[in-house]
Image: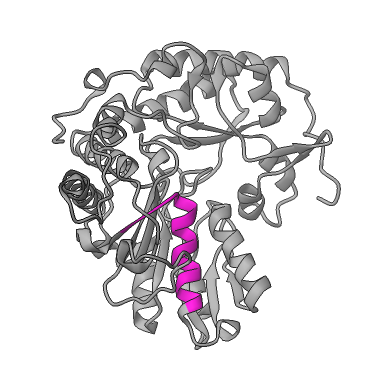
Amino acid sequence: MTAGPLDHSDAPVPPGLRQGPILLDYNATTPVDPRVVEAMLPYLTTHFGNPSSGHPYADQPRTALGRARAQVAALIGAEPADVVFTGSGSEADALAIAGVVLAHPDPGRAEVITQPTEHPAVLEICHALHRRHGTQITHLPVDAHGLVDPGDLAAAISPRTVLVSIMAANNETGVLQPLDQLARITRTHGVPLHTDAAQAAGKIPLDVTGLGVDLLSLAGHKLYAPKGIGALYLRPGLRLEPLVPGGGQERGLRAGTENVALAVALGTAAELAAQEITDGGPGRLRHLRDRLHQRLAERLPGRVHLNGHPERRLPGTLNLGITGARGTDLVAAVPGVAASTGSACHSGVVQPSPVLAAMYEGRHDRTDRATSALRLSLGRWTTAADVDRAAELLATAARTHATGTAAPRSPGS
């Protein structure tokens, strides 16, 4: 399909959003755009053929798969042949990281450099490689904004380093890492750079050539496609060991008959996202994000503090803390707003967000900062009325739950 100019009025509202709370949790998952559903449906009904078959039933699915690959490639400035479809963003991360390490003659002597605020999809595959193969995993520190210092990366790279994996945008704070600077360092040392761009793709312009990355992973359900589809960009000439060997699909890197319907969905979503960026979508979200922040600060003077960088972040992500109120308490107290925190509650004890704990390492208020965090993420169907109403509801709850004391500390903090 070819998307026309996109603004809020052009985007039909998904049925699931017509009733229910105000959605301010787009970073967790996005509603599937009805135009995406429309594009994929024929491949669940009429065009059922296996794209690898040699008869006419395969023609339309094969053509659609190629078109979807080109649409995804266009979103990130890549060539269609360099895009591999996967079953999720997490699988794309695993294929990139484990694929590089397992292609090394001795994975036990290989090193992967990453950082502690990565998505668990990156951290856990690194942990698994260390546990199973003895691969060395080095974590670079982050500053109070959650940014990696390129100088730390330059100092950390060693002859054992086979891959650096640094996310494009953090899923909790929206902070944008200096990928272009990091890529200059990795290129100098001949080490490939992978970036998890699940949160960034479709929200800000991305160009794999301009950024200098060698691998880039994305997830469909973060840009208005269904869950269960992702993609990996792979620089030509870079060898990966497949995680799922078999019939040779996806350049031999991901066996299994392709899910054409979901690939079409991802391709359509990518084209819509690219058009939305061109038409000023990021600026609209930035305005609404800042309006939400301002409304909360006006209603709770002196109590609202930003987590992350004030400028280097996604246009639709606002991570803040409200002094005297835990994020988990606010989310529970305001059912009219769907939001999230990075904290988790186990047996009545709130475990702080690992992302914010890493950012505030060494601070006396580290636990309080991390447990007070509230992530408010905006998207395609967020309106000014949503923002104003959410600010009022959250501020009212924060006043009600104000304790006048610091939030309880977790054991061992």
Residue 360: x and y, percent?
A: 65, 51
Q: Position of residue 128 (x, y in %)?
A: 63, 66
308 and 51: which one is in front? 51
Q: Nearer the viewer, residue 160 or 253?
A: 253
Q: Is residue 94 magenta?
A: yes
Question: Can residue 118 be seen by looking at this rendering?
Answer: no
Residue 87, horizontal then vertical, whole percent: 43, 50
Q: Is residue 183 left or right of residue 24?
A: left
Which residue shows up at 61% across the image and 60% down it?
Answer: 124
> Would residue 104 be found to the left or right of residue 365 on screen?
left
Residue 165 vertical placement versus 199 (above, below) = below
Query: Left or right of 392: which side holds 343?
Result: right
Against 251, residue 362 (above or below) is above
Q: How has the structure been colored for display? A: one colour
Taking the view exactly as shown, the residue that stands out farthest to the front is 55
Identify the image quadrant of residue 281: top left
Residue at image location 65% in from the left, 73% down from the top: 132
389 or 322, which lies in front? 389
Q: Is residue 287 visible?
A: yes
Which stretch appears magenta? 84-102
**Quadrant for the N terminus in the image:** top left
The residue sitting at 26% across, 27% down in the picture is 38
Q: Is residue 319 above or below residue 106?
A: above
Query: Main structural element of the magenta stretch: helix, strand or loop?
Result: helix
Total numbered badges shown on the rendered structure:
0
Q: Nearer the viewer, residue 83 or 159?
A: 83
Residue 303 x, y percent position in the rendering:
63, 28
Magenta stretch contains residue 265: no
